[in-house]
Amino acid sequence: MTQPVSQASIQEVAADWFARLQGEPTLEDWTAFQTWLEADPEHAAAYEAVEILWLDLDDLPANEPKTAPLAADIVPLRPRSSKPARRGLLMGLGLAAAAAIVALALTPRLATPSYTDYATQRGETREIALADGSRLTLGSATALRVRLSREQRDVTLVDGEASFDIAHLENRPFVVTVGAREVRVLGTEFNILSHAGRLAVSVRRGLVAVSGGQEGTVKLTRGQQLVQLPGESARTREVAPDQAFAWKSGKLIYDRTPLAEVVVDLNRYVATPIRVDPSAASVTVSGVLLIDEEAAMVRRLELFAPIVAETMAGEVVLKAKNARR
């Protein structure tokens, strides 16, 4: 019968991961770490505890030795390349001692935690479990960066779409940077789309504050969305709370949405570029599009709107049905 993993063992593994990821981790290292982190909520909690203890050590006064949490008879750390010795030493210590040893083994560059990059390919989605208990879901063709520190949790959405289910941590806000804007929360669930000059921040639970725009700080609560299109001012509108999250279940929902906006979305999922012909510039779309292979998505779009699709020169052009062909 499989024996349960002890809390001490989880703490030791967490400390070992923390040390390993401060060196030169490979893609395989990050993948293995993510698998371990998501296997059990206790893993994320243990890793965060190691991380916070390291940050506490870094905050010690300059004249106070950072070995304070260690027992007096702890032997000096062997060279980092001697992994079995280091692991054996960590297994014999409590979490505080393990974290202190990790701190001794690391370089000063850890004073500011580094960012971790995540990305998806076209048509791919990915769920990320952060060490603070928050969960992120990346949509198609999305890139973002994450940094967790003792004072604040930071994410930069470089491009694409992501949903955020944020663990509430008092005095440790979660801040998403999108271009010149910041979305700041303590604990909530929201979605951000930032692509091709278009921004949409939608809230399903809690309260977020969006700053950095000409309109000043805008507070959004459940069922509200801040949207800004290229060349236009941002505006706030009411939306169905679940609508902005539909992509996570393989659907794109539209309600009298300009065809050009729909096409911007579709181009994040398809390999063949789609373009709107001037004849269809005023067309709007209402309906639910299933995220599918590209030909099927275009066919469904033809059913929802008075358009026809023509393939030419490596692209799909959407024209109004009454346009001369």
Image: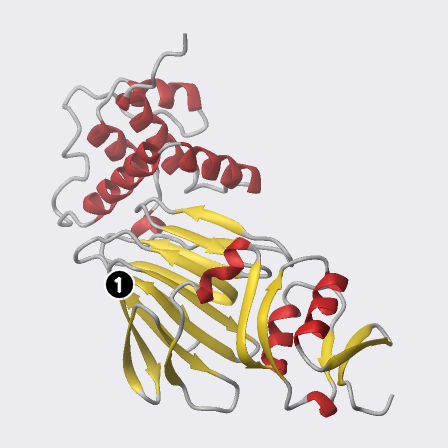
Whether 124 is drawn above or below 96: the answer is below
Q: Where residue 140 sits in the image (x, y, percent)?
A: 58, 59
**Residue at horizontal 22 percent and vertical 29 percent from the top:** 97
**In this picture, residue 190 sits left or right of residue 247:** left
Q: Relative to 179, is 4 above or below?
A: above
Residue 125 pos. (x, y %) = 56, 53
Residue 281 shown left or right of residue 100 in the figure: right
The extreme top residue here reads 1
Q: Provide the secondary structure element on which disc 1 rests.
A: loop
- Judging depth in this view, the residue of 87 and 80 nearest the camera is 87
Q: Quadrant of the C terminus?
A: bottom right
Residue at the spot x=63%, y=66% of the render?
268
The front one of 178 and 74 is 178
In which quadrant will I find the N terminus? Answer: top left
Residue drawn at (58%, 79%) of the image: 261
Which image quadrant for residue 227?
bottom left
State left or right for residue 217 relative to residue 87. Answer: left
In the shown orientation, is residue 73 left or right of residue 266?
Answer: left
Q: Residue at x 50, y 41 (%)?
A: 30
Q: Quadrant of residue 191?
A: bottom left
